[in-house]
Image (tube, grey):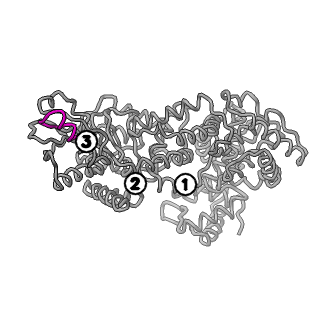
Amino acid sequence: MTFDYQLVKLMNLLDDGKYHTLNQLAGEMRISEKTLRKLTKELDEILKENGALLNKKYGQGICLKIENDEAFEGFIQTDSKDTFPVISQQRINSLAYDLLDTDGYVKIDDLADRYFVSRKTISSDLKNVEGLFRRYNLEIERRPHYGMKSAGREFDIRLLLSHLIQSEDSGFQSKLRQRFVSSEIVRDCIEQTVLKCGYTLYESEMSTTVLQIQIMIDRAEHGHPTALSELDRGPYLLEEEDIRVAEQTAIKIQEVLNTEISRSEIKYLAVHMSGKKKIMGSAQSGVMIDMEINKLVNQMLESVERNFQLDLHSDFDLQTNLRQHLVPLRVRLLYHLHLRNPMLREIKENYSFPYAVAAQASTVLSEYFSVVVEEDEIGYLALCFALSIERQKYTRRKSSILLVCASGVGTSKLFEYRFKETFGDYLASVETTDLNQLHHVDLSRFDFIFTTVPVDLDTVIPICQIQYFFDERNIRTVRQLLEENESESIRKYFRPDLFFTEVEGENRTEVLKNICGLIARNYDIPDAFEKSVLEREEIMQTDLCDGVAIPHPYQPMTETTFVATAILKKPVQWQTHEVQIVFLLSISKSKEDLASFYHTAPTFMMDRQLMKGLAQEKSYRRLIQIIEDTENLENNTEK
């Protein structure tokens, strides 16, 4: 049975999930209660066949009750959306499109009549439309007695139109697409041109590029061209080949569709193609990298080293890949173009540490371009970092040791030589001193002290006395110490006094303030610690997966590294995901080798099942068990 406009209006009124009396509904719909009873009976019959029903409650009225989400959603998406938008999200998308596609002003009452809902419902939906507009730098302009209309740059209007048309909930899709030129013809023109010019676009983005050209032609033909001034957002963005490919594509489209494409639209097309081009990693790519990109790559690697103690500056391949990747990425960030990453989930699951590194590196881009780098982009950056990090992962962690001897210089050198010969694979540096000079040595540079004589010294550095001519037993002892240093457990960073449960907060800012307050009770943190954590939140997404956020200060601030674990009383919408567990990480100001931490922590922090179990049990013991199990699994895998 097909909806008519009265059934749609009744459905819209019941969409809020609340109970409504027949008298209220009849008043809203301006019909008699007798007619309303007939409509409710008819609607109830339709709903029962599609996973829902009208639930009646004495003294309160009726409400919509969904019993089968999948069946009801399928019904909404097929039977009703092609005629009238029934659910709120459909109306929001359709309202946004109406405002973008209407040249003049429109009044709320006219919109209420058009969508068969009350004025109050339209006003509520328009608040969500305004939020959607703000994401695209647009606004709703209101004028007394005239109504409202959309306002903003044509470039941004087209981006929002593309988003709306690609949304599964957009009820106006089929109607709008009928107005567009053929997608097959546009795709064919693009493919012929890029192939001829040796240009490569991301295949996953081809449909979006086609849609943008369809929107471009439609908007231009209806009197909404793009101004050249909107496209001028920085020097050196578009290369000669970008303009050339756009020109050739425009010529081909003009020939096939008998339409005219202006110079400003050719530049518009060049921007989109430049942002979606795929730069191959070969030396023959011919890409000229400018000083701005060189500077950004260096700053990204410095940020990674500062926050992860991970020096990747010497990796030439990584730098080359990052520079090439930043050429189109810079265009996307400046013009707010979205690049979908179909591998994002797999990247997060299999390259959790490179993803965390890429997220940190992206803060440089966020600050420079004044935009939050999206998850999809971080995923592509993670692939750039992954190979370099894997190479470092399998490099043995080496120790710096101090040898203390009581004999002369000659025998000390012999002892040093023998030590290097036996344990060279474990050693970063070896220095010798005699017992008298030991108190003048800066011990902070060493991981171990090995001595042939008894040493009475107050230090946290392990001291091991061995024989001058060490035997097999001494060799096993030394090797065991060096190997344990190589794979130190990360449990020490997760202190029991920094494990909090039932942490409250209505939003991420409140949650973070509460966590920082709890930390301050048990740990001496700087006064600016909380401010630094919140500052970083503004330039980087820290909810890297469902259920978990991993925030930390903008820069290292504390004397030691620690992780405060907070399990929230109820989930909070962070940036993209709902979060119930927060791991607030603070890196020490001193140089500290955190390789094992960064290789292990993301593995369990981004494991949905492990975190779900922790959120349910809410115990420190459970957290430590998760860490130990993860470390054991990694050690067994490496063996």
| Residue 33 visible somewhere in the drawing | yes
Q: Nearer the viewer, residue 311 or 306?
A: 311
**Are the residues at dot 1 and dot 3 in contact (C-beta closer than 8 Å)?**
no
The image quadrant of residue 431 is top left
Q: Nearer the viewer, residue 142 or 189?
A: 189
Q: Which residue is mark 3?
A: 417
Mark number for residue 637? Answer: none
The image quadrant of residue 83 is bottom right
Magenta stretch bounds: 404-416
Q: Secondary structure at mark 2?
A: helix
Mark number for residue 603? Answer: 2
The three-letter amino acid code for the residue at tag 2 is Thr
Q: Quadrant of the N terminus?
A: bottom right
Q: Which residue is mark 1?
A: 16
- Looking at the picture, how far across and down is residue 105, in whole percent? 74, 36
The three-letter amino acid code for the residue at tag 3 is Tyr
Label 1: few (<14), some (14–19) or many (≥20) C-alpha neighbours in 10 Å: some
